[in-house]
Amino acid sequence: MRSSIFTRLMLYLSIFFLILCSLTYFALTSYFEVYYTQSRTDALIEKTKEVLSIYNQDGLTPELQSFVDLAEEEGTVIQIIQKQVNSAETSLVKNTAAESVQVDQLQWTKTTQTEKLGSWVNSQKLAASENSQNGSGSGAGHGEGMNAGEGSGNGTGNGSGNAGSSGSGMENSLENQVDAHQNGESFVMILGNSDHQVEWLSYKEVAADGSQIVGRIPLYSVNEVIAIVQKFLLIFLIVIFSCSLIFAYFFTRGISKPIIRLNRIAKEMGNLNFTEKYIGHRKDEIGQLGETLNHISDELETTIEKLQGELNKERTLDKMRQRFTAQVSHEIQTPLAVIKSYAEALEDGVLENQDEESEYYITIQKETDKISGIANDLLDLSQIESGAYRLKKEKVPGFEVISSVIDRFRNTYPEKNIILKDRCEPELIIEMDRKRIEQVFYNLMSNAIKHVRPEDGIIEVECELCSGQWVVSVYNTGNVIPESELDQIWKYFYKGESDKKGTGLGLAIVKGIIECHGGKVEAVNRENGVRFEVALPL
């Protein structure tokens, strides 16, 4: 169970966090690469346009030189490629003085502004242009002072020669790549030799005089920053993923552990073991499920106990019915045998006088009444069990009902010491079915008469008001009832081990009648006797 739920939850959460972190990594790296490249491009364009603005206003000035130097320190290379200008001047001087002849002199001056910035052409930044201009000027001045040929040679050698020897190959490649793109266009240039080439992110602007202003930054610096950020994001997301796995472990454990416990409780319930209970303080669905299982366990335990009790009661009832059948058969058989023998004696005329014959008739009548009493008890029992026992309530004085039953027993058993104590008002009115309540007290008195010891022992009847109830008690001296039988004596067909008299229906009928009135019954052992109590609500 643990491997199933715990492992599957961990697997699902791990896959989820892995996918989430991977998507986050690719999304952030892609976004940062685009964003950073665009931001560097925007900065490059801004620097280039600032140089263009200064150049269009003032031309090549020290201020422009300072701005370009500052931009280079910040990582941006700015180059100004001036438009090439070819000029030819022919000067013919004729001197008619003594034997001096001036020959035609053709002077060619070529001025080229080469690239100024770059890691391997730093010596050419704007100084190339100045050297070219200085060389041309110096040559021309020196030529006039000394001679034209030397001046032309020096001017050409110093200016054009130095500049050309340093950067002509690279300038041709740079100029070709720059010329291939339009004004205001961003592009990538590849500069360097066969051994070392560098990609440059470039931007081109054309000045008012036709010069090309190119700003560029090395792509490797952009790529290095992107690689560093990607590496940082990768490490960061690995840490996040590890923390997510730790969270997933405790989260999964917090879910799977109570489920495993609940499953164990359910299995114990299936084995009819209800001692296992859910113990927890969770208020979520798992806690509610645990409380529900506890409730179901309690209900099942109670129900099974009740069913077991009912089953035991049914088994006991069957045994009691068997005993009752045998007892009733014996109780009926005895008076029937007496009736039959007395009837045969009367039929044969064996009696000698009228008095003896009258005595036989009285005996037959008594035995018939005994059989009738058993039949009535069985009828009452049947009505109580089926719920068809109907009461005809009326308001009558309670003491009057009790005294009528007591007077009947005093007349029948004058030798018994029967005492009646009334602690209630004589005119107290009780709502009851008088006939049924008289039957209750009759059964209680019969039970007391049957069990009083010694034969002339005390039978005390007492009535009183207690907690809004009319309580009547019947006490008789004699043997006490075993504690284990105090709750059993009110059951149908029950007879104590030492009780060999009666059918075991009298007290059961008492309880049924009193409960139909909404009252209760109780039997309590007292010193040297037993006290039976019935209580009726007022």
Image (cartoon, helix red, strand yellow):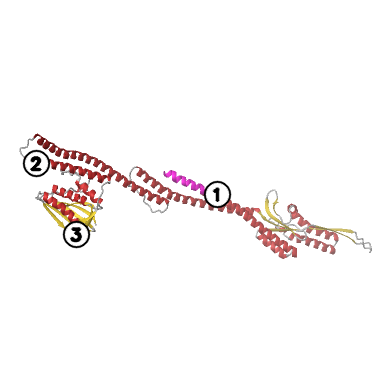
Whether residue 150 sits left or right of residue 438 in the image: it is right
Q: Quadrant of the N terminus?
A: top left
- List the residue tagged with mark 3: 427
The residue depicted at 17 percent of the width and 39 percent of the height is: 332
Whether residue 378 sits left or right of residue 157 in the image: it is left
Q: Position of residue 336 (x, y in %)?
A: 15, 38
Residue 59 showing in the rendered view: no
Mark 1 surroundings within 10 Å by alpha-carbon count, few (fewer than 14), some (14 through 19), many (20 or more):
some
347 over 26 or under it: above or below: above
Q: Position of residue 372 (x, y in %)?
A: 18, 42
Residue 3 lies in the magenta stretch:
yes
Q: Main secondary structure of the magenta part?
A: helix
Residue 343 showing in the rendered view: yes
- List the residue tagged with mark 1: 22
User: Going by the picture, which residue comes out furthest to the left?
Assistant: 352
Q: Amino acid at mark 2?
A: Ser
Residue situated in front as seen by the camera: 362 or 189: 362
Residue situated in front as seen by the camera: 270 or 362: 362
**Which labelled disc corresponds to residue 358?**
2
Q: Quadrant of residue 186?
A: bottom right
Residue situated in front as seen by the camera: 203 or 325: 325
Q: Which residues are magenta?
A: 1-16
Whether residue 411 sits left or right of residue 189 in the image: it is left
Q: Quadrant of the C terminus?
A: bottom left
Q: Amino acid at mark 1?
A: Ser
Disc 3 to disc 2, C-alpha distance: 44 Å
